[in-house]
Amino acid sequence: MTDKGMYMDTRQAGGFRGLASRMLSRYRVSGDGPVFHRFGAWIRYRREGNGHPRRRGDETCGIIAGN
C-alpha cells in the first residue's frame, strides 16, 4: 500500500465510520474519537487503525516519508 493509500482525510474517514466529518472534527477538539495524524495543516486518519478509539493525548504529528 502506498503512503497516499494509507491515510484518509476527514471526509473519507467519516464515511468509513458512518459519521459526519463535522463530528470527527468535534471529536478531535474534545479528545475523543479515532487517532489522527497532523501533517502541517492537514489532518489524516490511518485506514488500518481507523476502527480504534483514541485516548486523550494520542494525537501524533509527523511527516509522510517516502519509502
Image: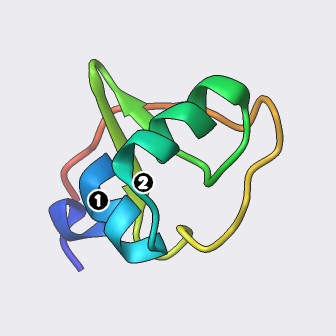
Question: Which of 24/58 is in front?
Answer: 24
- How far, Cα to Cα, is label 1 from label 2? 5 Å
Residue on which the image places disc 1: 8
Look at the numbered disc 2 and give the secondary structure of its residue: strand
Tag 1 and tag 2, C-beta contact below 8 Å: yes
Where residue 66 sits: x, y (%)? 19, 51
Where residue 4 sits: x, y (%)? 17, 60
Look at the numbered disc 1 and give the secondary structure of its residue: strand
Residue 37 shows which numbered tag?
none
Name the amino acid, label 1: Met
Tell me what residue is drawn at x 20 percent, y 70 percent. Answer: 5
Q: Is residue 66 above or below residue 17?
A: above
In the image as oriented, which residue stretches furthest toward the top? 41
Asked whether, in this view, residue 49 is left or right of residue 19, the answer is right
Dot 1 or dot 2, earlier in sequence? 1
Q: How many numbered markers are drawn? A: 2
Tell me what residue is drawn at x 37 percent, y 62 percent. Answer: 13
Asked whether, in this view, residue 15 is left or right of residue 24, the answer is left
Name the amino acid, label 2: Tyr
Asked whether, in this view, residue 29 is left or right of residue 13, the answer is right
Mark 1: few/some/many CA within 10 Å (<14, 14-19, 20+):
some
Mark 2: few/some/many CA within 10 Å (<14, 14-19, 20+):
many
Where residue 9 sits: x, y (%)? 27, 50
Question: Which of 5/30 is in front?
Answer: 30
Where residue 62 sits: x, y (%)? 42, 31
Q: Where is residue 34, by image quadrant?
A: bottom right
Question: Which of 28/65 is in front?
Answer: 28
Residue on which the image places disc 2: 45
The answer to whether one can see residue 9 in this image is: no
The answer to whether one can see residue 54 in this image is: yes
For the C terminus, the image quarter is bottom left
